[in-house]
């Protein structure tokens, strides 16, 4: 199969690719047939045609359904990209025909979601009234998986481990500074000066050891000559982190944008449940950028929203 057109000349069609994509997601011929709105015998014939064209098996029957062979998995991965690109093409054609309307699916890590994505959505509400958006806030590895699955148009984050060939990361947009947040009334928040050693007297709430935030925090503490902080709970859940520090004396290192949004200075006139400790450890998480599927083409409205996010535009627009 050195000729890149061999599969096409032998009769490989979009219907075959759609079936492989459905099989990779369902693992059952009946469910794949239902997804394609065809009868199960028709799906079985399509599968047999794929194997005839490929010249070797692309599936194995198991007790619970179907498992794709390495050949089948390779075709299914490419099929998923073809199906995603066709869906995006249909969306782009609809946007062009409607003159500025469309739907954009955006992902972001937490800090830029507040600093970049939210202002861009405010701007889009005024500048692109016919555009709707869907936002997912998660870690970069989760966003990368959703990008590859075609569930997101683009994301703001960092390159996930092992996805370098499948995703493309733009030039750095910005770094993420980190602040320390605690509950209002915390003993450290009442002190005029926080000594570094005092921080080690309290539990810290951090994600797991593989998380970028955790690695950045521990590296900076080592640089300051401090030991790893006490940590009895590891979680990447933002809501659980907020609940824990509100109900305990724990310290949470969080993106500065998050702390500015949900916390305040200890002596602020307008009280919030959380306060930012008056100490700057100089912690920053590595720069983030615009993540896209390698080789993909953003729809017109997705390109406009991506430009707004990277430029950091902001106007009031939400009711």
Image (tube, helix red, strand yellow):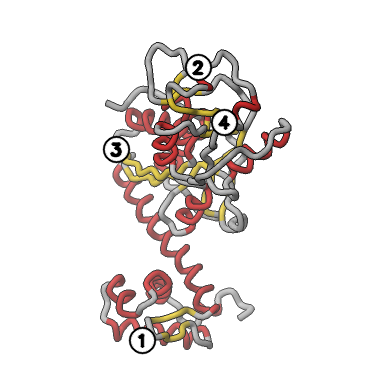
Please name the residue that numbered disc 4 is placed on. Answer: 178
Q: Circle 4: is it few (<14), some (14-19), or many (20+) Cα within 10 Å?
A: many
Q: Which disc, if any, is residue 28?
A: none
Label 3 close to label 4 by CB (< 8 Å): no
Residue at the disc numbered 3: 130
Which of marks 4 and 2 precedes in the sequence?
4
Task: Identify which residue, 202 or 297, lies in the foreground.
Answer: 202
* Total tally of numbered discs in the picture: 4
State how far apart marks 2 and 1 are (Cα): 73 Å
Q: Earlier in the sequence, mark 2 or mark 1?
A: 1
Residue at 31% across, 27% down: 318
Name the residue located 47 percent from the left edge and 17 percent from the top edge.
266
Of the pair 103 and 116, the residue shown nearer to us: 116
Mark 2–mark 3 distance (CA, rounded to whole Å):
49 Å
Give the residue at mark 2: 190
Q: Nearer the viewer, mark 1 or mark 4?
A: 4
Residue tagged by mark 1? 45
Circle 2 — which element? helix
């Amino acid at each position: 199969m050195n000729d890149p057109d061999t599969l096409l000349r032998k009769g490989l069609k979009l219907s075959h690719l759609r079936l492989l994509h459905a099989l990779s997601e369902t693992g059952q011929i009946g469910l794949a047939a239902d997804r394609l709105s065809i009868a199960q015998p028709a799906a079985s014939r399509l599968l047999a045609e794929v194997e005839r064209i490929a010249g070797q098996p692309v599936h194995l029957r198991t007790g619970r359904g179907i498992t794709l062979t390495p050949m089948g998995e390779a075709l299914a991965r490419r099929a998923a990209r073809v199906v995603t690109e066709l869906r995006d093409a249909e969306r782009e054609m609809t946007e062009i025909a409607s003159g500025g309307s469309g739907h954009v699916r955006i992902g972001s890590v937490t800090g830029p979601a507040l600093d970049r994505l939210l202002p861009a959505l405010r701007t889009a509400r005024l500048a692109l009234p016919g555009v709707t958006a869907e936002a997912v806030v998660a870690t970069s590895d989760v966003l990368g998986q959703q990008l590859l699955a075609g569930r997101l148009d683009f994301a703001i984050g960092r390159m996930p481990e092992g996805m370098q060939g499948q995703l493309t990361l733009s030039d750095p947009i910005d770094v993420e500074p980190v602040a320390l947040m605690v509950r209002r009334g915390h003993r450290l928040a009442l002190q005029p000066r926080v000594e570094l050693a005092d921080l080690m007297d309290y539990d810290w709430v951090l994600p797991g050891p593989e998380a970028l935030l955790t690695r950045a925090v521990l590296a900076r503490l080592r640089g300051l000559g401090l030991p790893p902080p006490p940590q009895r709970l590891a979680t990447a859940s933002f809501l659980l982190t907020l609940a824990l520090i509100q109900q305990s004396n724990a310290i949470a290192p969080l993106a500065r944008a998050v702390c500015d949004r949900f916390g305040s200075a200890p002596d602020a006139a307008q009280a919030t449940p959380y306060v930012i400790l008056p100490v700057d450890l100089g912690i920053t998480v590595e720069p983030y950028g615009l993540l896209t599927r390698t080789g993909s083409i953003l729809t017109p409205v997705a390109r406009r929203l991506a430009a707004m996010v990277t430029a950091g535009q902001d106007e009031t627009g939400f009711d």
